[in-house]
């Protein structure tokens, strides 16, 4: 019976589709946290496959820091229109205007950590009982510890020391009123798996991931896109370089890499050769040893 | 995830797409060196990135450790780093040109046994570590028993810290002897023994220069070559229905697709099938995926099945071949691993989950509890509490369709959920 064998990408795909269907079956009102990055794009693609030929039974929720790459927004809107999806935007700017969160000051100011408040607010207001995320366990050491079905208390908090056991593929999404779940269907994928899958499935990607010319400047060893959202110090000089992004998030904490990779094949070769993790270019993780764990406990993605 | 230039030129996308997946987990007592071993495996196979190495170098230095603490690669939580132990499973990934691996590094501390079970429940292979100085101890017994109960097809016992016993062959042989004596009482099919030093790297990825008396494979060689093709059941066709796909679109007016992941066997278009619990028969009309229709599908594929006839099927039901049906019972025995501080309540009511089905059940009878050290059945004290393993009879409100866990890990497993707290309190395997 040796013919009946799935290669590892097919097995990962099947596992993820299984999880997305469990979400649809176990929850009343789930959403996909859509950032415009490659992981949330892959999750959305998997959702299209999971429910085909029916439409995706989830809302896309974008927590918008206001500091976006225009290319990412254009991509998002096109994806939504093409596939008849529902999109909801939770705005960090609004939360700042209403005085619910305070904008960080100074050169390293970032709205990344501020996303937690509008995220939890959107979950509460729209009565989402499950938020599907594109986080992968290989990204970061705190994420490496998280379950597929991750329980959140009524404050949206994660308790890493007291997670529910998760056996086989039996997922327990039961919860009390006011609590919700975060579910991570591509937990078991690596960066390489994601790119190989994008290549195999011919998924269209935002242009940011491919090599292009851009005005950038260097700070603490990271190259940032020049944008009105970042104050530059006197010695920081903007120059045009050929770059691409390995992850796409808020402009102020997404670092560019110098790269000539213009096709998916090129990107795959580059990922294979890479000596640093993709989060090595993310300023938000460099703040302290347990930065991600602390943010996650508070209700971050 | 290779690093040298030579390997980069050789990176072969096509081969990557064709790789097999091996899931393995670690087990063994506290401080036997599980996390260090995983760190060593990742480090010596060059699966660690520069920034990750720098981060653990800095963290080790800050802690005043004299060498780089490889356990920090998996012990990622603040509380774990403070205490120097693993609390919850960490999942790590790496690949070699031959295979892709998913590692579950699990805690050794008895308090966190449920997390060990979580990591082990999906594994094809378990690495059980033994400290060469201590030999086989209670946690070795417990974890080996759990591994056999979970029917993990392959067990590799790594006798670790050989550097601390002067690489002594006799010590190794004694432990192998002791382990075999114990394992003969268990249901373990395929066991290997390797003497290693996780700290120094001996026999992990590279052959040891200190133990010429050992002629067997290194751990890495074993992981890359062990035969895993036959770990799934491809004989008994089982399709638990997860979700009914009903497109609200005109062109699909009467479409009813049953979405699920094949739990066993093979389904083909035209197969005569039966829906449980209704018992109605029909034929498979199509096997649908977004990439096009399939002629056949097998475990563990996720597909959508449509039938020739309109019969009533919903989540929790199961589609099987007409001439090969599972057991259908309302009362059955399970081996239960209890995972909650609150003890099992005799005649207590719980929510039971089995594949995509959920209903209520009552604990009819606890038959016995196991003494982990001797594997003796304890029949006079059958109070089942945290980390206990016992045989229990359950009665459900509706019949379940299941196979023995031995026959099928998916259709033979259940969990119990506490109605009040919603916590998963036990894992069960159909006897
Ligand atoms: N000398 C020596 N020490 C080792 C070896 N392997 C691990 N150690 C040490 O043993 C201690 C415990 O190692 P860990 O890897 O954290 O043990 P663990 O099994 O993961 O522990 P838990 O996850 O808490 O159950 C550390 O101080 C390691 O450096 C070895 O081969 N030789
Ligand atoms: Mg450990």
Image (cartoon, grey):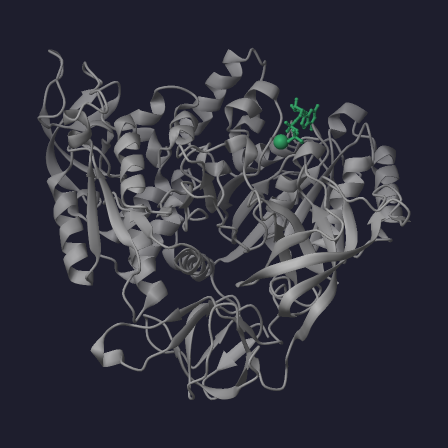
* Viewer-proximal residue among A234 and A119: A119
Query: Residue B400: in sight, yes or no?
Result: yes
* Vertical relation: A193 (above or below) A14: above
Rendered-image quadrant of the N terminus of chain B: top left
* Viewer-proximal residue among B9 and A221: A221
Tell me which corner region of the image, top left, top right, bottom left or bottom right, holds residue B69.
Answer: top right
* Viewer-proximal residue among B18 and B116: B116
Query: Where does residue B28 sit, x and y in percent of width and height?
Result: 72, 37
Q: How many marks?
A: 0
Query: Where does residue B84 sit, x and y in percent of width and height?
Result: 61, 22
Query: Where does residue B419 sit, x and y in percent of width and height?
Result: 58, 49
Rendered-image quadrant of the C terminus of chain B: bottom right
Q: Residue at x 19, y 29 (%)?
A: A95
Query: Residue B188: in sight, yes or no?
Result: no
Tell me which corner region of the image, top left, top right, bottom left or bottom right, holds residue B108.
Answer: top right
Q: Residue at x 83, y 33 (%)?
A: B135
Q: Is residue A189 left or right of residue A81?
A: right
Q: Is residue A205 left or right of residue B408?
A: left
* Image quadrant, ligand 1: top right
Query: Where does residue B154 sit, x and y in percent of width and height?
Result: 69, 54
Tell me which corner region of the image, top left, top right, bottom left or bottom right, holds residue A296.
Answer: top left
């Amino acid at each position: 019976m040796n013919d009946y064998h799935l290669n590892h990408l097919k097995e990962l795909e099947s596992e993820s589709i299984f999880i997305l269907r469990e979400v649809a079956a176990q929850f009343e009102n789930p959403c996909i946290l859509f950032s415009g990055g490659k992981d949330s794009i892959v999750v959305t693609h998997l959702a299209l496959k999971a429910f085909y030929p029916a439409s995706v039974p989830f809302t896309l929720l974008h927590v918008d820091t206001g500091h976006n790459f225009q290319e990412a927004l254009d991509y998002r809107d096109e994806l939504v229109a093409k596939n008849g999806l529902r999109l909801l935007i939770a705005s960090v700017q609004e939360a700042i205007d209403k005085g619910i969160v305070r904008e960080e000051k100074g050169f390293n100011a970032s709205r990344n950590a501020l996303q937690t408040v509008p995220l939890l607010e959107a979950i509460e207001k729209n009565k989402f009982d499950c938020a599907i995320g594109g986080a992968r366990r290989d990204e970061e050491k705190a994420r490496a510890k998280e379950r597929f079905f991750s329980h959140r208390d009524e404050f949206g908090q994660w308790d890493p020391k007291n997670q529910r056991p998760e056996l086989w593929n039996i997922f327990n999404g039961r919860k009390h009123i006011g609590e919700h779940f975060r579910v991570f269907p591509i937990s078991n994928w690596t960066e390489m798996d994601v790119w190989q899958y994008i290549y195999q499935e011919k998924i269209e990607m935002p242009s940011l991931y491919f090599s292009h010319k851009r005005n950038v400047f260097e700070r603490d060893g990271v190259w940032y896109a020049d944008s009105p959202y970042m104050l530059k110090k006197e010695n920081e000089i903007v120059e045009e370089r050929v770059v691409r992004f390995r992850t796409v998030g808020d402009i102020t904490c997404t670092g560019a890499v110098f790269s000539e990779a213009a096709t998916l094949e090129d990107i795959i070769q580059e990922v294979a050769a890479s000596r640093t993790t993709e989060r090595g270019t993310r300023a938000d993780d460099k703040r302290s040893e347990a930065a991600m764990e602390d943010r996650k406990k508070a209700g971050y993605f | 995830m290779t690093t040298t230039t030579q390997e980069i030129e050789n990176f072969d996308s096509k081969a990557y797409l064709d790789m097999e997946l091996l899931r393995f987990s670690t087990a063994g007592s506290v401080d036997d060196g599980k996390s260090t071993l995983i760190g060593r495996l990742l480090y010596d196979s060059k699966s660690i990135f520069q920034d990750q190495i720098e981060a653990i170098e800095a963290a080790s230095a800050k802690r005043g450790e004299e060498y780089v603490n490889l356990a920090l690669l998996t012990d990622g939580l603040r509380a774990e780093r403070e205490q120097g132990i693993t609390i919850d499973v960490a999942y790590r990934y790496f690949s070699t040109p031959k295979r892709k691996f998913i590692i579950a590094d699990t805690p050794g501390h008895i308090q966190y046994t449920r997390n060990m079970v979580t990591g082990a429940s999906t594994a094809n292979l378990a690495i059980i570590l033994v400290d060469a100085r201590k030999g086989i101890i209670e946690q070795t017994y417990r974890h080996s028993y759990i591994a056999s109960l979970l029917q993990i097809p392959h067990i590799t016992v790594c006798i670790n810290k050989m550097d601390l016993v002067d690489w002594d062959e006799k010590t190794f042989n004694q432990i192998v002897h002791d382990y075999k004596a114990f394992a003969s009482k268990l249901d373990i099919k395929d066991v290997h023994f390797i003497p290693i030093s996780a700290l120094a790297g001996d026999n992990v990825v590279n052959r040891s220069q200190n133990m010429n008396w050992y002629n067997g494979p290194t751990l890495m060689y074993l992981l890359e070559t062990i035969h895993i093709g036959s770990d799934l059941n491809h004989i008994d066709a089982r399709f638990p229905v997860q979700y009914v796909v009903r497109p609200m679109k005109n062109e699909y007016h009467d479409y009813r697709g049953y979405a699920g992941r094949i739990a066993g066997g093979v389904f083909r278009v035209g197969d005569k099938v039966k829906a449980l619990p209704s018992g109605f028969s029909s034929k498979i009309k199509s096997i649908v995926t977004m990439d096009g229709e399939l002629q056949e599908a097998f475990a563990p594929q996720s597909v959508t099945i449509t039938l020739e006839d309109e019969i009533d099927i919903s989540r929790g039901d199961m589609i099987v071949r007409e001439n090969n049906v599972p057991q259908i019972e309302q009362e059955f025995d399970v081996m239960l691993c209890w995972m909650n501080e609150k003890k099992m309540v005799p005649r207590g009511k719980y929510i039971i989950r089995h594949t995509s089905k959920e209903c209520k059940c009552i604990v009819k009878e606890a038959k016995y509890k196991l003494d982990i050290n001797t594997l003796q059945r304890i029949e006079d004290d059958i109070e089942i509490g945290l980390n206990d393993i016992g045989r229990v009879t359950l009665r459900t409100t509706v019949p379940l369709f299941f196979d023995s866990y031995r026959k099928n890990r998916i259709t033979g497993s259940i969990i119990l959920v506490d109605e009040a707290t919603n916590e998963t309190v036990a894992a069960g395997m159909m006897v």
